[in-house]
Image (spheres, rainbow, N blue to C red):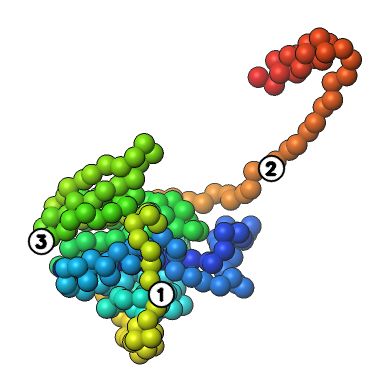
């Protein structure tokens, strides 16, 4: 079976800084890591490969430095890695990102299961998994916390919902997004680290995946970031004085004013 794990390189901090002029992430001086949820996706892909045989392909779209994330994926058990990197992809919103990833998956061919993290640390939308499934026209389940059974053309997964768990059966190929409860990611092995150092990372641009220029990058992105800002928190306090009954009346008046 062939497993494709989608991996995004993100800034290794929860304190995301935005450039107020360009409305894009400030990446300078911030260490880059594999998006934490994607380490669970990768671990699950590797475990499923160990269970059923086959291979794991790590797939990422990003700038050339995202190669480091893919090398790390190889050290953690991925067999192959593909980086989608092209100026034509710059400025992609989630829709254009999913389009490029779906084209790459189509080119890879013969994928049984596509595994994504539930969301990223930076973009944080959780949209790429479901969009990918829609573009590939295959079934999708989000928040998967256990792959109960997988065999040729069939998968049964458990997914977390607020009140408990739900079980889904789907035909393969399919897309799942996973939560951190699904496994405990392994550490890189010595053999894996050595393999990662010399592994060939395949780099594809728009032409390699037959991407339509009108569906890629800024021109293929229906979303526009108009403004990014932190909500202003205004803390005003007021002290009511006098007998309690008067204070209650004053409070009621104030509440009426604000409602
Ligand atoms: C108008 C607009 C312009 C943007 N311009 C830029 C830009 O110039 N540069 C930039 O870096 N970002 C840009 N972004 C952000 C970019 O669109 C998102 O980072 C990207 O689409 C993924 O969305 P997300 O981070 O919310 O992923 P989510 O949907 O939260 O991710 C879910 C899962 O999908 C997979 N996934 C997500 N992204 C990737 C990826 N790139 N490769 C492989 N797997 C992935 C992972 O498994 C991840 O766990 C822009 C966004 C908008 C709206």
Q: Residue at x 59, y 70 (%)?
A: 30
Q: Is residue 171 above or below residue 231?
A: below
Q: Quadrant of residue 241?
A: top right
Label 1 to label 2: alpha-carbon separation = 41 Å
First along the sequence among labels 1 and 2:
1
Indicate the quadrant containing the C terminus: top left, top right, bottom left or bottom right. Answer: top right
The image shows a total of numbered marks equal to 3
Q: Is residue 249 left or right of residue 66?
A: right
Marking on residue 152: 3
Label 3 CB-ligand 1 distance < 8 A? no
Task: Please state the horizontal and vertical placement of residue 94, each as a whole percent of the image.
Answer: 39, 55
- In this rendering, the answer to whether 8 lies above or below 163 is below
Q: Residue at x 17, y 47 (%)?
A: 169
Q: In the image, 149: left or right of 101?
A: left
State which quarter of the image contains the N terminus.
Answer: bottom left
Q: Which residue is mark 2?
A: 232
In front of the other: 30 or 136: 30
- Left or right of 8 on screen, residue 115: left
Cβ at disc 1 under 8 Å from ligand 1: no
């Amino acid at each position: 079976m062939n497993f494709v794990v989608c991996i995004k390189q993100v800034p290794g901090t929860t304190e995301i800084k935005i450039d107020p002029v360009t409305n894009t992430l400030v990446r300078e001086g911030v260490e880059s890591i594999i998006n934490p949820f994607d380490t669970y996706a990768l671990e699950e892909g590797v475990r499923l490969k160990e269970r059923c045989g086959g291979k794991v392909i790590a797939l990422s779209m990003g700038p050339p430095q995202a190669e480091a994330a893919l090398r790390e994926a190889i050290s953690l058990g991925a067999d192959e890695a593909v980086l989608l990197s092209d100026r034509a992809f710059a400025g992609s919103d989630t829709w254009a990102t999913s389009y490029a990833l779906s084209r790459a998956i189509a080119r890879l061919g013969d994928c049984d299961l596509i595994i994504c993290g539930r969301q990223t640390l930076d973009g944080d939308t959780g949209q790429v998994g479901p969009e990918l499934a829609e573009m590939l026209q295959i079934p999708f389940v989000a928040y998967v916390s256990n792959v109960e059974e997988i065999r040729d053309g069939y998968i049964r997964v458990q997914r977390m919902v607020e009140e408990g768990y739900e079980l889904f059966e789907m035909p393969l190929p399919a897309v799942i997004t996973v939560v951190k409860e699904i496994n405990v990611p392994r550490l890189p092995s010595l053999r894996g680290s050595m393999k990662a150092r010399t592994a060939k990372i395949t780099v594809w641009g728009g032409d390699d995946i037959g991407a339509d220029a009108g569906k890629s990058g800024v021109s293929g992105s229906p979303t526009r970031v108009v403004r990014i800002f932190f909500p202003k928190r205004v803390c005003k306090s007021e002290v009511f004085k006098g007998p309690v009954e008067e204070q209650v009346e004053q409070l009621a008046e104030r509440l009426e004013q604000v409602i």
